[in-house]
Amino acid sequence: MPTPRYWVYSSDRGNLFTTEIAALLAAALADLGYETVFPAPGLPEPGAERINLVVAPHEFYPLQRGFGERELVGAATSSVAVCVEQPGSQWFEVGAHYAGLAVGILDISSDAVGEFRRRGLDATHLRLGYHSSWDRWGGDPARPRPTDLLFLGSATPRRERILSQEPVLWDCTADIRLFESSRPMREPRDRFVASTEKWDLLASSRILLNIHRDTAPYFEWVRVLEAMANGCLVLSECSSDYGPLLPGKHLLAVPYDTLNAYAVSIIADETLRAEIATAAYDFVRSELKFTSLLEPVCAHVEELALSARPVRKQSDSRPPRPTPPEAPSRAALAASLVADSRVRIRARAKLVLDSETALIQQVDALHASLRYGDPDYAEILTTRAWAECNPRVSVILTSYNYESFIVETIDSVMSSYGVPLELIVIDDRSDDSSVAVIREVMSDHDWFPMILMARAANVGQSLARNMGVARARGEFVFILDSDNAIYPTTLRKLSEALERAPDAAFSYGIIAKSERGLLSQFPWDVEHLCRGNYIDAMTMIRRSVLDEVGGLRSFWGWEDYELWCRLAANGHRAEFVPEIVAWYRVHSSNALHTTNLDINRLFRELRIRYPSLPWSEG
Amino acid sequence: MSNETVVATDAEPGEGSAVLAVEMQIRALKRQLAQREQALALLNRRLLRLERGEDSLPAVSEVGVGDMAAHVLLLRAQMSSLHDENDALRNELHWLRHSKIFRWSRPFREAFYAMRRVFRRR
């Protein structure tokens, strides 16, 4: 039996992305009629009849177990390196080390090829292209695309800032799949999709939004080609390497600050969207077929294998190690000491603030008892529409000294559609004119089902919310703060999510933080939750579940986190809606600025309360 | 409850839910319109910058002059499509504002009740 010609290696402990590239390469080689082994086992071995292709050498060699450096170098010298990392990263350098020992270098990025050549290494551009295995659309214009906008990528501050910019993309069906970039993606999880599932998703989406992870304008070729192969329009920010694709004809390439504006306009124009997406589909199928692009590269690789000479001499056989952290300088030590003492001072300030608040609350409660005979006395005001409504959702809005924001917040609730609702406002004894402002709004909007409970004594946010929940008539309650706001579709989307997932205790969506990033952007994951709270209080919770677990409890500004942990410990879960559903106003008196001061103390307390949760060690 | 107050007392049975639906629909449409207009304003600014030559397209790409012209045309198409969409939304808002149901909501309803109170006193 003849020896197979091509042996395609990729690490089984590496990222799924590289495994996908290796699989594509193997499939295209097989299409060209080559005997191909994929995934090839062990380390590449020399042989006149075989060509070893090592995909992502920066992962393949460092992740090998049970081999010494000499064996790795031996394997590298009998292979062609297929590099996939962008220049500028430490991974590129690791890959470049092994690539330098190889008989040839292929790279999927033209920028990286340029970088190799600048270093005197002969590299060849392996342009990726269309492959029929990606195509789940098949050019069928009648295939429904229920998702208007799709985003796939790791969560970086830049991407989150751009996604949160105006105009916020709330008026569409979006699927924003951000995943934590701190861990390698070895298998689909956290809504990270691969292969068939990813291509199906692209074939069901109208637009793929492409945002660079940082300021380097590298074009995400694989993602773009996969979208085009599935008739999904690519709306990308400007990049450095489009050719031979033409912006305006095969994709839209626009400055990052207009991405959302273009998305809004293209969602409203299906004819234009379909026209560009179809042009791109036709182009990649005819001009960018991967087998056609690979054929000349194979001829070149055959020549390289025949010559069997490393692309450079083995002057340094040690791979670059990721740089260890430098010993801190005196200045850095001094700065860290100052920072430590700041944390301690802030923690003490928080304690003082807490006890002061507790005292004020006691005095308030005494006043209320003396005056009204009840420490929980609240003046109650309802609109005409209140009595006759039969709500599905009760919005619980707590108000405390936000007279300048509350009208906008109430107005955002009044703009909701698609679900019967009521608004319950609990004023927690504001010192400003919040109550007067709310009364005026109620008087002007008597058609809207709304109740104001103006407490005579301040009691704190969680107990005020519980008071609202006790008054709620809806099956679901939505928690809202008076300085934030929702979009017209928020309550409908979150209530539909709870209807779709009867086992979910609550639902939540992504929150745009005034063009500074996102909150609640990851799906429900108890391990993630144990590393820190990533879910804002703006959620929709089943009233029955809140009753079951005893409502919200005071927890030094982390009431929401305490509740998520309690729900998780009780075996409950949340349903994530991958769309922007609300916005969070960043201002000087945000609760966030006065909470989170003594994090260690809060974590200790949570561990004691909920020991069954998977807290990390330490 | 003795400490409860109802803001408005002149209720017409059955009227509330219809007004509620229309009022909320109008508000939602206004927000949709605001979002579109925000997008339109941004695209308009971009177009002006491009036409005045104050901006290159795109700053880091190798797109030539022909592509730039194509881009401007595309931008125009986008804006015209958004204009059409916004006109449709405006029409819808206008229709809702002048629909029979809305005529009976504030301020018409308030004026009607005020008049009725005056006549009842007589």
Image (cartoon, coloured by chain):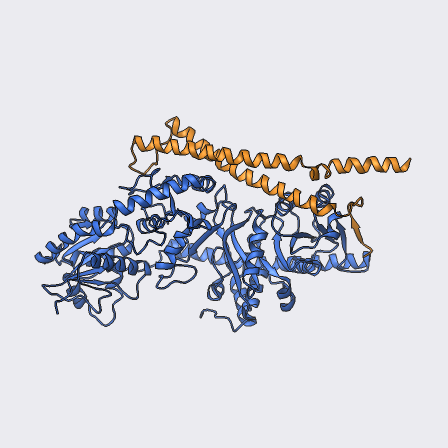
Chain colours: A blue, B orange
Residue B5, given in percent of the width and then of the height, sits at 79, 50
Q: Residue furthest top?
A: B52
Q: How many marks?
A: 0
Q: Quadrant of residue B71?
A: top left
* Most distant residue in the right direction: B122
Observer-nearest of A131 and A490: A131
Question: Viewer-proximal residue, A11 or A565?
Answer: A11
**For residue A75, side relative to residue A573 (left or right):** left
The image shows residue A475 at horizontal and vertical percentages of 65, 60
**Quarter of the N terminus of chain B within the rendering:** bottom right
User: Which quarter of the image is occupied by the C terminus of chain B?
Assistant: top right
Q: Quadrant of residue A542?
A: bottom right
Can residue A97 be seen?
Answer: no
Q: Quadrant of residue A502?
A: bottom right
Which of these two is toward me, A269 or A451?
A269
x then y, percent, for residue A616? 45, 69
Lateral position of residue A8 relative to residue A482, left or right = left
